[in-house]
Every structure is written in structure tokens, then in C-alpha cells.
Image (cartoon, grey):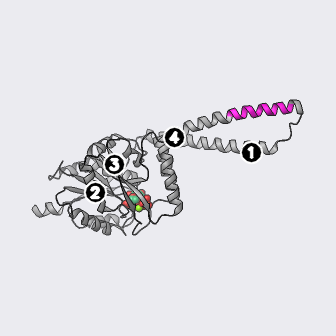
Amino acid sequence: MQLVSVMQSFQEQPEQQGNITLSIIVPVYNEQAMLAMFHHELAQTLALLPKEQIEVIYVNDGSTDNSWKIMQSLPPIHANIELVNLSRNFGKEAAMTAGLDLCRGQSAILLDADLQDPPNLIPQMLNKWREGFDVVNMRRSDRQGESAFKKACAHIYYRLLRKLSDVEIATDVGDFRLLSRRVIDDIKKLSEKNRYMKGIMSWPGYKQTCLTFDRPERVAGDTKWSFIQLVQLGLAGITSFSVKPLKIATWLGGIVSIGAFVYSAIVLFQALFFQNSVAGYPSLMLIQLWLGGAQLMAIGLLGEYVGRIFTESKQRPIYIVMDNHSTPSLKVSRSG
Ligand code: UDP
Ligand code: MG
């Protein structure tokens, strides 16, 4: 209900319905230290695009600091500003989904609020879209300010995901990307509740291109992801877009069973003909431990998939919009 009313109020704005070329979607969670700076920097880039009709959608993902207050007092810029307030913290994936559901542009760009996705790349992305690309992926050539461990994990993970996934998911590309209207419309048809946006945004396919950029360090505030959350997101990516891990478990089970069959034949042979059935404590322990570990992992893996089926089956909404505000573009307020 609430979602419908928000969409209506967005659509009630008379100007440029259908003419908006670009929607910029910014998920915001506890970014009070960053918001004003981000808005200022974004405004500078948008001022260079006076001919474009642009809307900026800030999605407040249940911030517990002053982010929502600050958002409401942001100065008008050369773009409509739409503020969406979610009823609690639903997570970045849900906040981005809300933005994509509500945006009206012919294209959309997802941008982090911490300036790690530089707004000054927007004109280049728009150019690529005008050349006819539906998806402009922004590949990180360097991740400044991140530990060698995180960089190595990200490097291995993206390649593993690519190997396992049934969908072509671009490597080293985060959520920062441009999507055309037809891609957005197709994404809106994917109603899954476990949302791994990097996979979801790659799923429709279409004409894709890649631009490379150096990902700068976060200017202020802290990353919102703990190591465990990153591992969970990583697992979500694999289990949402591939059943290969289950198949691998089956194959491993098969190989181990064959090994077990051969080994039991040897043990039986030794016991029958050499009466040496007591020796072998180390091998017994090793097999016990390895098999126990492998079984637990396989059960855990099954649990991941069953858990996903469980959350899907509940059919809960992905997010709830509590309220929204709009500030017209400087251009509109001047002429009107
Ligand atoms: N974010 C969000 N909801 C969350 C966590 C993060 O909307 O639950 C937003 C956050 O405000 C930022 C973006 O997602 O705009 C990226 O978050 P962060 O910088 O913490 O991620 P990192 O760059 O460390 O991967
Ligand atoms: Mg960041």
C-alpha cells in the first residue's frame, strides 16, 4: 500500500514524466559524515550536464544517525531530488532495489554515498549509454585503502563466482554501474527476496561494456560491512546464482565412496589373510575427521539452500517505504 502511494506521489509531479534521462540512486546508511560533501560533489558534476533531465534518489536505509535530517536539508541542485525513507535498515541490496523500483529515468546509475564511486565519471557513463550500451559496468582497477587480505579475498571470490555462476557476472565490478530502462524493467520482474544485486543486475544480459577506474578510499565514516557480513554476502552470491556447489558435493561424495569401497576391500583383505586388524588407528582417525568435516560442510551447504527456499516461500516485501519527499530541480524552480 505504502509503496503504491509513494510511486503515485513520485508520478504526480507534472514535469518530465517519461523525459528523465538519468536517475542516480544513492543508498544511504549512517552517512552523516559524508552526505553534504557527497551532495556537493555530485552537484558539481550535474551542473556540467545542464541539458539532461536528472533525478537523484537518496534512499535512507534506516539510518540511526542524522542522515535523514541532513538529507531533508540538502540544497536544490540541477536535478530533482527524491528522498525515500525506509522503515528500518533492510541492507544495501534492498535499498538499491527500492531505488530501482521507484526511479523513472531512461537510465539509472547506482552510486555509493561515500564518494568511493566518483560522481565525475557520470558523463562518461552516459556517453556509453548513448552509444547504445544497456549496461555500463565500472571495473575497479585499484582498491585504495583496503587491506591486502581484503583485496586478495575479493580477487579470488570474483573469479570463483564467475566459475560457479550460471550467469555471466563481471569480475571486479561492484554495484556502481549504469543500467538502461529495459534492463531496469527486467530486473523489476525478478521478485526474489534474497537479493544479490551484482548477480541480479547481470542476469538480464543485453549489450554490456566496461569502464575502468581507481576506487578511492572512503573519505569519512566507516565501511558498513563486517568481515562476517562480507562472507555472508559472498555466500549469498554463490548460492543465489548457482547450484554447482550442490553438484560438487554429490561428486565429492561419489569419489569418497569409491575410495571407501577400495579401502574397505584392502582392510578386509589384510584382516582375513594377515590377521592384522588392530593396527591403523591413525588412518581411522584421519578418515573419521575428514569425513565428519566434509559431511558437516555438505549439510551446512544444504542448509544455505534450504534457508533460501524458506525466506523465498514467506513472500515478504523486500523493503517498506515509510515516507518520501521531493525537491524540484534548480532549472524547474527557476522557470516555475
Ligand atoms: N549501505 C546501505 N545499507 C547498509 C549498508 C550500506 O544503504 O545496510 C550504503 C552505504 O551508506 C554506502 C553504500 O551502501 O552508500 C556502500 O557501503 P560501504 O561504503 O559501507 O561499503 P564498502 O564500500 O565498504 O563496500
Ligand atoms: Mg564504501
Point out residue 127 in the picture as x, y percentages from the top left corner.
Answer: 25, 53
What separation in Å lies between label 2 and label 4 (alpha carbons)? 40 Å
Task: Give the quadrant of residue 332.
Answer: bottom left
Check disc 3 and report its element: helix, strand or loop: strand
- Name the residue that disc number 3 marks: 209
Q: Nearer the viewer, mark 1 or mark 4?
A: 1
Whether residue 225 is in magenta: the answer is no
Point out residue 155 in the picture as x, y percentages from the top left corner.
Answer: 49, 54
Which one is nearer the viewer's eye here, 277 or 9? 277
Disc 3 residue type (three-letter): Thr
Disc 4 residue type (three-letter): Tyr
- Name the residue that disc number 2 marks: 124
Q: Is mark 2 within 8 Å of ligand 2?
A: no
Q: Is mark 1 within 8 Å of ligand 1?
A: no
Q: Is residue 95 left or right of residue 305?
A: left
Q: Is residue 268 left or right of residue 251?
A: right
